[in-house]
Amino acid sequence: MPVKLTNYLEPEYKTLCCNTTAVSLHLNKISHWIPGSPSPGVVLKPIIDTLSLTISAEKAYAALPITPKKAGTGEVLDRDLWWNTVVHRFEAAAKSADEVHLGSGSRRPRPYDRHFDMILESSRAKPLFSFRSKPGHKRRLRLETNIHTLGLKGLEELEARWAQLAGPFVPFRALLPDAPVTRVDVAVDFLNVSLANVFAHHPKLWKLWCCSDPDTGAQTLLHFFKPPGKKSEHQSFKKPAELSIYDKRVEQLSRDTEPEYGDLPHTRIELRQNTQTFLQNLGKSFQTKLVEWSIVRAGLEDTAEQAAQRRALDSIRVRGYPDAR
């Protein structure tokens, strides 16, 4: 089994069954159960997926124990000079054949113009470091990573790599106290629930983009609000979606990764949310906007009622929410 737990019979575990497999889950991973006979579903507790921070290093620079702040050569180490030195060190490492832990980033968020993927040995996450190479900007670095995939070992390795690349003046942890979190992706996993049976609606919903396999059906649903000032009715799937629903099992197979829950249907709902809270306040003041969405599951029974529910759901997707009710 892809999910290996010590003892399926222990009371803190629950067993989820369907036609293809049985999976035991620890109770601390479960948010709630979705009733259904013969196929109950389960919703796992939300996780923080992608996290983005913009970094100025003002407090870290001010705390440097050097008066005046001078490098070993005696040159005054002002903040812009320090940032430029860091960028040059990252560029040199990315071009070096001997440095295998850094590469040119394929993701290129604006207005940053230097992008580097950090390759870690202890995690599948590839933290993206995006710099503004020109001085004069307050926030010179944007860091984006999948915090759930990164894990504690990955974070420790990231700190060590930063020290090797950026030099000894500012440790990685010193960058975080005054670094606002600008993006948080909250993910919720549904087990034993097919993506085709999930429907999400929001009063501001403008476009729904669907990617389907001819044989297996829908695999990705992207939900968009209308951007301010947008006149065109066209919506590119490459633009960031407010809410994404996708077949997590298919996504894992596409990365040549063994599905975490075997053959069990695994649907992920992922909310992209912009914010301006500080990292230390994320657990205290951050409120997810998932409560603003209506998310329903259709097809609980293998009966005529289930078929009618599915037809209604498909009708909503094709004809629109008001006309299909």
Image: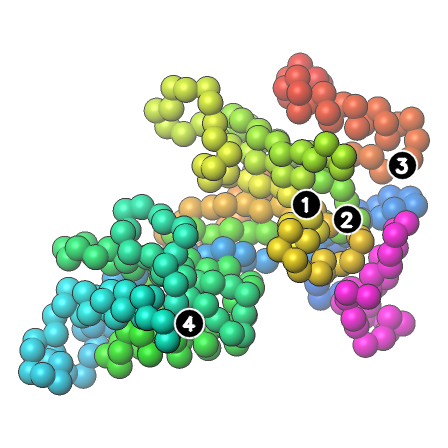
Badge nearest the viewer, 1 or 4: 4
- Residue 6: within the magenta? yes
Kindly indicate whether the residue at mark 4 contacts the one at mark 1 (C-beta within 8 angstroms).
no
- The quarter of the rendered structure image containing the C terminus is top right
Residue type, mark 4 in image? Val
Give the Cα separation between the discs numbered 2 and 1: 8 Å
Magenta stretch, main secondary structure, is loop
Disc 1 designates what residue?
247
Badge nearest the viewer, 4 or 2: 4
Span colored in magenta: 1-26
Kindly indicate whether the residue at mark 4 contacts the one at mark 3 (C-beta within 8 angstroms).
no
Q: Residue at x 68, y 53 (%)?
A: 253
Disc 4 designates what residue?
100
Q: Position of residue 80 (x, y in %)?
A: 15, 64
Tell me which label, 3 or 2, sits earlier in the chain: 2
Label for residue 301? 3
Residue type, mark 2 in image? Pro
Query: In the depicted view, which residue is nearer to us: 101 or 186?
Result: 101
Tell me which label, 4 or 2, sits earlier in the chain: 4
Q: Residue at x 81, y 27 (%)?
A: 309
Q: Quadrant of residue 46?
A: bottom right
Tell me which label, 3 or 4, sits earlier in the chain: 4
The 10 Å Cα crowd at callout 1, few under 14, some 14 to 19, many 20 or more, is many
Give the Cα separation between the discs numbered 1 and 4: 32 Å
Label for residue 265? 2
Residue type, mark 3 in image? Glu
Q: Position of residue 81 (x, y in %)?
A: 14, 68
Kindly indicate whether the residue at mark 1 contacts the one at mark 2 (C-beta within 8 angstroms).
yes
Residue type, mark 1 in image? Asp
Query: In the depicted view, which residue is nearer to us: 181 or 171?
Result: 171
The 10 Å Cα crowd at callout 2, few under 14, some 14 to 19, many 20 or more, is many
